[in-house]
């Protein structure tokens, strides 16, 4: 695609969601411009498992299969989880989900962010329908005089024009801010500590989650027998845990996890990230749309952030394709509103549901603890309810 051409769609941000959207649209025959500030580091099998992993749901796997990258991901390093176990430190009652109950081989897969992004990037570089501008940053955007295209000014002095511009540039989206789209934010005053740990007993291809007073702890199974942990705690507690020596950290982690997998025998270096909720007030503007973290950031409680973003990408690609088939303007207000209606409500419901669960299960009030324990027990006993929550938990 010549740089003088007007792209059908210009996407800013080539993280997992932006890259998947670019590839999806290009495979549907759209001419796509993709702007990214830096190329991702290549994934290598000999490297240590990346600390950033995602729990891919069935909907995300279906998208990656359609983009013809899932087979490569699965054969490289993807860990199926077939069961989920959820329990509360302060109350009896537990939830157990099993893929067999749904007639499936797995509830989902634990995969490194780096692996997904690396393989999507390779596919993008091979596709003739994608004009890749990297390294490049957007410094301004405006609707062109006739209103049928939007321009992007890049930091190298060049410009791009497209019928539709999509911001996939993350939680602190430059484009969203340039267009004056406001967000509603909530800072949880927590940090999520991540590490990969070894333990005495096998993880049983199970994703484990324990609710603790003011904290949650998840163990996610890795292909090498270890587990990836996400330990969400208050900022001050996170600072304390990060400062511990490895032996003391392993001991405290094992106790917090109720030694479900025995003693913690080894750990990688630890890292932490701030937890917050951020929801864009609107997803669209004239010839402009938000996807992924640029539109919504949710609590990592259920590991659904990337899955929600992939659903954005799949929905937007489908809406644009439908408009083109009908010979309608792909970036008309009606077309973009259709995408916004379908995704904004789902994302908001999910975000507030995760927020409510985090608030309710984070409480150490005895009455609240008793109620949530009873709730877990009830859901565990009623098969239709259990299946409903299993499907929601797995995305």
Image (tube, rainbow, N blue to C red):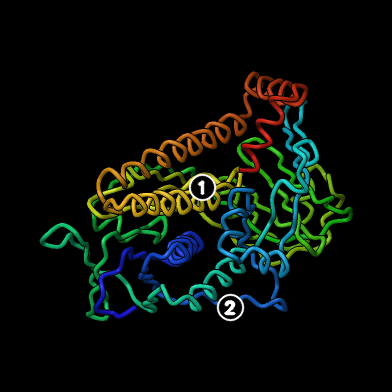
Relative placement, left or right, of 17 versus 107 is left
- In this rendering, the answer to whether 18 lies above or below 135 is above
Q: Which residue is at the front of the view, 306 or 127?
A: 127
Given contact means CB atoms under 8 Å apart, are the residues at marks 1 and 2 in contact? Answer: no
Please name the residue shown 76% across and 26% down the image: 380
Q: Residue furthest front?
A: 326
Please name the residue shown 54% across and 69% down the image: 120
Res. 387 image quadrant:
top right
**Which sits earlier in the primary sequence, circle 1 or circle 2?**
2
Res. 209 image quadrant:
top right
Q: Label 1 belongs to which residue?
A: 308
How many marks do you count on the picture? Answer: 2
Q: Position of residue 35 (x, y in %)?
A: 36, 71
Q: Residue furthest left?
A: 145
Mark 1: secondary structure: helix
What is the crowding at mark 2: few (fewer than 14 residues within 10 Å), some, or many (at least 20)? few
Q: Position of residue 230 (x, y in %)?
A: 65, 52
Relative placement, left or right, of 38 versus 364 is left
Locate the C terminus by quadrant: top right
Mark 2: secondary structure: loop
Q: Label 2 belongs to which residue?
A: 42
Q: Which mark is residue 339?
A: none
Q: Which residue is at the front of the view, 275 or 34?
A: 34
Q: Position of residue 143 (x, y in %)?
A: 17, 59
Q: Which residue is at the front of the view, 379 or 288?
A: 288
Res. 13 image quadrant:
bottom left
Locate the N terminus by quadrant: bottom left
Mark 1 and mark 2: Cα distance apart in space: 25 Å
């Amino acid at each position: 695609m010549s740089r003088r051409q007007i792209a059908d769609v210009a996407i800013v941000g080539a993280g997992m969601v932006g890259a998947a959207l670019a590839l999806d649209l290009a495979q549907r025959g759209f001419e796509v411009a993709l702007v990214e500030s830096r190329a991702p580091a290549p994934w290598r099998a000999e490297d240590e498992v990346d600390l950033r992993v995602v729990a891919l749901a069935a909907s995300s796997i279906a998208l990656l299969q359609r983009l013809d990258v899932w087979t490569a991901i699965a054969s490289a390093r993807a860990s199926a989880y077939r069961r989920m176990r959820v329990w509360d430190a302060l109350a009896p009652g537990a939830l157990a989900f099993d893929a067999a109950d749904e007639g499936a081989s797995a509830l989902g897969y634990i995969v490194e962010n780096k692996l997904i992004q690396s393989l999507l990037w390779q596919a993008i570089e091979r596709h003739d329908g994608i004009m890749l501008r990297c390294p490049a940053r957007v410094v301004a955007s405006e609707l062109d005089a006739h209103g049928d295209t939007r321009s992007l000014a890049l930091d190298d002095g060049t410009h791009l024009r497209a019928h539709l511009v999509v911001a996939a540039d993350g939680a602190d989206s430059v484009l969203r801010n340039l267009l004056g789209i406001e967000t509603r934010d909530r800072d949880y005053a927590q940090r999520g500590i991540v590490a990969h740990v070894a333990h005495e007993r096998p993880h049983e291809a199970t994703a484990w989650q324990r609710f603790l007073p003011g904290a949650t702890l998840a163990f996610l199974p890795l292909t090498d027998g270890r587990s990836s942990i996400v330990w969400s705690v208050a900022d001050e507690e996170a600072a304390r845990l990060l400062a511990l020596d490895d032996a003391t950290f392993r001991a405290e982690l094992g106790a917090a996890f109720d030694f479900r997998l025995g003693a913690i025998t080894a750990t990688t270096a630890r890292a932490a990230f701030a937890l917050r909720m951020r929801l864009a007030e609107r997803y669209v503007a004239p010839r402009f749309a938000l996807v992924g973290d640029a539109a919504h950031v949710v609590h990592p409680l259920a590991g659904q952030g990337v899955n929600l973003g992939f659903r954005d990408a799949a929905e937007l690609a489908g809406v644009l394709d439908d408009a083109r088939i009908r010979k309608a303007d792909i970036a008309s207000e009606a077309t973009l509103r259709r995408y916004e209606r379908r995704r904004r409500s789902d994302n908001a419901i999910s975000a507030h549901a995760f927020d409510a669960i985090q608030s309710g299960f984070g409480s150490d009030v005895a009455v609240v603890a008793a109620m949530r324990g009873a709730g877990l027990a009830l859901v565990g006993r009623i098969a239709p309810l259990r299946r409903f929550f299993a499907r929601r938990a797995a995305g």
